[in-house]
Structure formats: structure tokens, C-alpha cells
Amino acid sequence: MSNLALYTTTVLVWGSTWLVINFQLGTVAPEVSVVYRYAIASFLLFAWSALRGLRLKFDLHAHLRFFLLGLFLFSFNYIATYSAQQYISSAQNAVAFSTMMWMNIVNSRLFFGTRIEAKVWIGATFGMAGIVSLFWPEISAISFNDSIVLGASLCLAGAFLASLGNMASKSAQEAGLPVLQSNAWGMFYGTLITALVAWRRGSPFDFEFTASYVSSLLYLAVFGTIVAFGAYLKLVGRIGPHKAGYAVVMFPVVAVILAVLFEDLKLGANGAVGIMLILTGNIMILGFWKKDLKQHPRLNQMSHFLFDRKKPVNPCNTQPGQSSRH
């Protein structure tokens, strides 16, 4: 699957989950719903791996990586973010969580020594400005009291933990561990950790046997977890978390567009400006994706610069019938 397809899948699916999660709120405690979600996703990934004969046995060092992936990306990140929404609005939560993009940039430099190009910093600035503009009515109404500070702190903590999860996935892929099985084990450990937290909190493990709850749970488990995380973490391995992390800025745009279409949300001038700023940042950071070399030699030259961390190929030096890919 191409980088464009991976990125588009991630953004569209995670953007849609904002609407679907509403059907999860009510009878069942949020952290318990997360346990159900990742238990289903983990089981399905293990079953799929077994059916395809994929390797599921790994050494202790690999399981340490899986545990860190589950701890940061499939457990504590969600606990912190869900807890934050008890004190701040979903819009404010989106703004705070979008800082993961910046955290990925900094952590990529710290953990992997990734050279961060100027256009990535500039594009990230456009994206952050776009998020603020998109949700400006809610942001401008903020009253900085203890609950707002607590909620924002929890969300920022969740974003930081998610960023560490991105680094854990990148490290695992560089160590040769496959994404699918890493996710299966990571979600398994995330399920156990979140279940333990829910138990310690005294949250009852209730279940809502309604069509809306069950269907939304299955959608979140299959598409919002297996498909979206599979696509996103594959992208993290290919282009780096400092670029893939821009997805957290893009999927609120999809959520807002869906709300305009299905929830009669009125998009004002600030929303339109915000979307344009976010799209501008997206183009600056990610540019264009790889196309057919014969039809788009210029795009292939740019793709080397954006994705492969190698010197771009001069299409003029490419011989007929010879691939310009290194």
C-alpha cells in the first residue's frame, strides 16, 4: 500500500471515530469500553496471524518493546485523554492532543537523531494555527480554572505518552519486528494494563447490549484500531513519526466536515481559515506521494526528498527503462 493510501486511510478512519465514540458514552465506563475495544482488536489480529501462519513467538526483548507499545499507545494514552474530557470539551481536547505533532518532531530528533527540515517546523506551525482557528469559538470561551488546567494537563500527558508509543513502534520496526504482530501483542498488553487500571478505579465491567453500542464498538475495534493503527504505524516506519504525526492535525478536519454533513454544524469563517491553514501545513510537511515513475518523474524526485531521506534523483539522468529508485 502506498504512503498516500496509508495516510488517507488513517485520517479518514480516525476522523470518523469522533462521531462513533459518542455511541460509546453512557452506561459503560470509558476505560472499560477501551478494554473491550482492544481485547476484540487483539483477538482478531492474533486470529488473522494464526490463519496466515505468521510468526507469533518472539523473544523477551521483543516482548519488552510490545509492552512499551501497549503501555504508551494502547493504554495510558487513552486513559489520560478520556479522563481529560471530563474537564474540558472535545474541541479543547483536540487542540491539546494535536501537540503530539510537535512532540513527535522533538522526540524523533532525540531518540533517532532525525534531521528535521525547516519546512516540517513551518508546516507544523501552520497546522497548529489551523487547529486553533478551527476551534476558536470554544478556545476563546475558556476560563482558566483548576478543572481546565487539570483537563489540559491530562490531555497533554496523553499526547506525550502517544508520542512515546510512536517512538516505540518506530524502534520496533527498525529492529525488524512486523507491524501486524507487534500491534497484536501491543494491544494485548494494553488491554491487560487498562483492565487493571479500571479494576483499581472500581469501574464496573458492564456491557450495553444495544445495537448502537455494539456496532460502534465493533467499528472502533476493527476500523478505528486494527485498520487505522496498522496504516498509521506502517507510515511511521516509512516516513518517520515527525511527518506521520501530522495525521493528528488532519483527522479533526475530517471530524468537523462529517459534523457539517451529518450533525448540521455551521462552519464559520474561522473554521474555513483553519482548514486551509491545516491543509497548507499538510502539503508543506508531506508534499506529494510517489507516483508512477514513467508518468511523474518530477514527483518521484520530490518523493525521494520527502520520504527516503536520500538525495533526490535527477530525472534527466534516468535511462529509459531504468528505475530511478535507489
Image: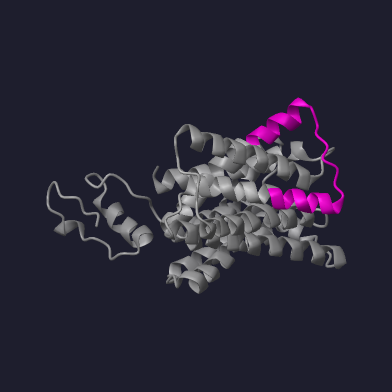
Q: Indicate the position of residue 32 as horizontal and vertical percent values.
A: 77, 44
Q: Indicate the position of residue 24 as horizontal and vertical percent values.
A: 76, 38
Q: Is residue 207 located in the magenta-colored stretch of the structure? A: yes
- The colour scheme used here is one colour
Q: Residue at x 80, y 34 (%)?
A: 207
In this view, 99 is above or below 267: below
Q: Nearer the viewer, residue 129 or 299?
A: 299
Q: Nearer the viewer, residue 3 or 46?
A: 46
The answer to which image quadrant residue 119 occupies is bottom left
Dominant secondary structure of the magenta stretch? helix
Quarter of the image with the N terminus is top left
Q: Nearer the viewer, residue 138 or 20?
A: 20
The reply to whether residue 245 is in sight is: no
Q: Indicate the position of residue 269 as horizontal and vertical percent values.
A: 65, 52
Q: Is residue 233 located in the magenta-colored stretch of the structure? A: no
Residue that extends furthest to the top in the rendered view of this protein:
211
Q: Residue at x 50, y 55 (%)?
A: 59
Q: Magenta residues, as a range?
A: 192-219
Quarter of the image with the C terminus is bottom left
Q: Nearer the viewer, residue 124 or 74?
A: 74
Total labels: the figure holds: 0
Q: Residue at x 48, y 49 (%)?
A: 179
The reply to whether residue 140 is in sight is: yes
State left or right for residue 195 relative to residue 122. Answer: right
In this view, 107 is above or below 7: below
Q: Indicate the position of residue 39 as horizontal and vertical percent values.
A: 67, 41
State left or right for residue 19 relative to residue 226. Answer: right
Q: Residue at x 74, y 29 (%)?
A: 212
